[in-house]
Image (spheres, grey):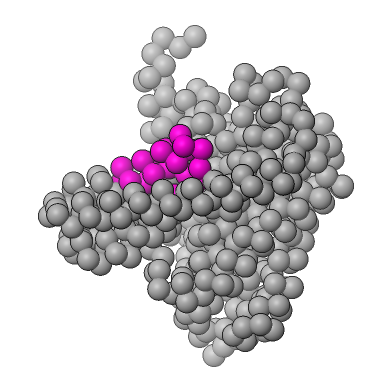
Amino acid sequence: MLEHPIEHAVGIYIGLLLLACVVAIAAKLITHLPYTIFLTVVGLVVGLLRWGPAPEEAGFGHELIFFVFLPPLLFHGAFHMELNRLLSHLGPILCFAVPGVIVSTVVVGGVVWWQGGIASVLVALLFGSLISPTDPVSVLALFREARAPEDLRVLVEGESLLNDATGVVLFTILLEAVVRGGGLSFGAAALAFVKVSAGGLVLGGVLGLAAFALLRRLEDHLLENAICLALAYGAFWLAEVLHVSGVIATVIAGLLIGNYGRRFSMSERTRETVESFFGSIDFLLNSLLFILIGLELREVPDAIPVNPWRLVIVAIVAMLAGRAVVAYPFYWALNQVGQRRPESWKHILFWGGLRGSIPIALLLHLPTPPTVPPDSPLVVLRPALLLAGFGCVFFSLVVQGVTMRPLLRRLRIGNEAT
């Protein structure tokens, strides 16, 4: 038993933060690749060499990951999304972000259940829901550098923003079914999906508009920044208390403040303060997530009941198959009924569907006893899901992320065409 647990936990936080800074510095000095790629490698090294403390020693419980890490990450992403451009491409974005995530969940879940050794169909679908949301931060950075078409950037960014919400809602519904035990009624699940999504949308809209009205009356950049932080966490918390989607509530509130609040109620100094603050929080939380998953992986190889290499390979194939089933048929269908877009874009939508912080956060949110009964299939399969999920994120960021530039050049997109 530790004599001073608070001091021990603070020491762990400082150590993890310093490690994240060292990784980011190395990424800047060695290469121009996004630091998340290096963090993924560090997480792998931590897991393989079994360095560091257990996450529980620093108080990183699964509920903390969900309620402390997710809200600012989601708010920051929504804050920078231009609403007019999102609405101008809303049809295709919704097509990829809602039915696309549902289809991907089923495909991924089916493959890992069939070939990956995940014996429970519900747990396999749970894995499909957490690995389906995309996180194209590094891709968008390459888009900006390559001066890729604006419509392509909006399509990729908008899909990522909304499919995070869809994936987390599906994950929450499936996790409840797994923890509760028994089967899953698809009719009840569909009704719950509509209910929590609509409730989150309405609540996020109300809170976002209320915050906007309050911000218009203020001229204090520190106070306005604090209100934005309270909105990010408050929208998420209140929605979860009311049993609606905290993710959707936070995203909608972030969209409203990022578009109307930033334009009509914030001074230049306030905008700079809010953007710098949430950018710093985004870096810190992303860094901690990737290092924490490495700490969680330390004991995984000895705990999973299936062949680890086979599981990881099957999970990666399942992830790519799920993305291909969404990217190519959906893109073809959208070109038949609406605005025709270049055929080369479908390859970017497929290969550029990277996985990042949201799947990692959901993996870390998977509960352990006593939250779930010891005989729950989730207890036995949780280590396998951690390994498979990290394998997918590692492949996505390291392999897909690094090869995006050559793909843009080969497809002659943006200034890579020259």
**In which quarter of the view is residue 311 placed?**
top right
Which residue appears at 74% of the width and 46% of the height?
186
Horizontal and vertical percent position of residue 262? 27, 63
Q: Which residues are magenta?
A: 229-249
Whether residue 241 is visible, yes or no, is yes
- Above or below 242: residue 390: below
Which residue appears at 59% of the width and 51% of the height?
194
Which residue appears at 36% of the width and 20% of the height?
7
Q: Is residue 240 magenta?
A: yes
Along the line of sight, the residue nearer the viewer: 282 or 134: 134
- Above or below 64: residue 44: below
Of the 4 image quadrants, the one containing the C terminus is bottom right
Which residue appears at 67% of the width and 62% of the height?
100
**In which quarter of the view is residue 96 placed?**
bottom right
Horizontal and vertical percent position of residue 48? 66, 37
- Above or below 287: residue 305: above
The secondary structure that most of the magenta stretch takes on is helix
Q: Is residue 46 magenta?
A: no
Horizontal and vertical percent position of residue 174? 67, 40
Horizontal and vertical percent position of residue 403? 63, 69
Whether residue 300 is visible, yes or no, is no
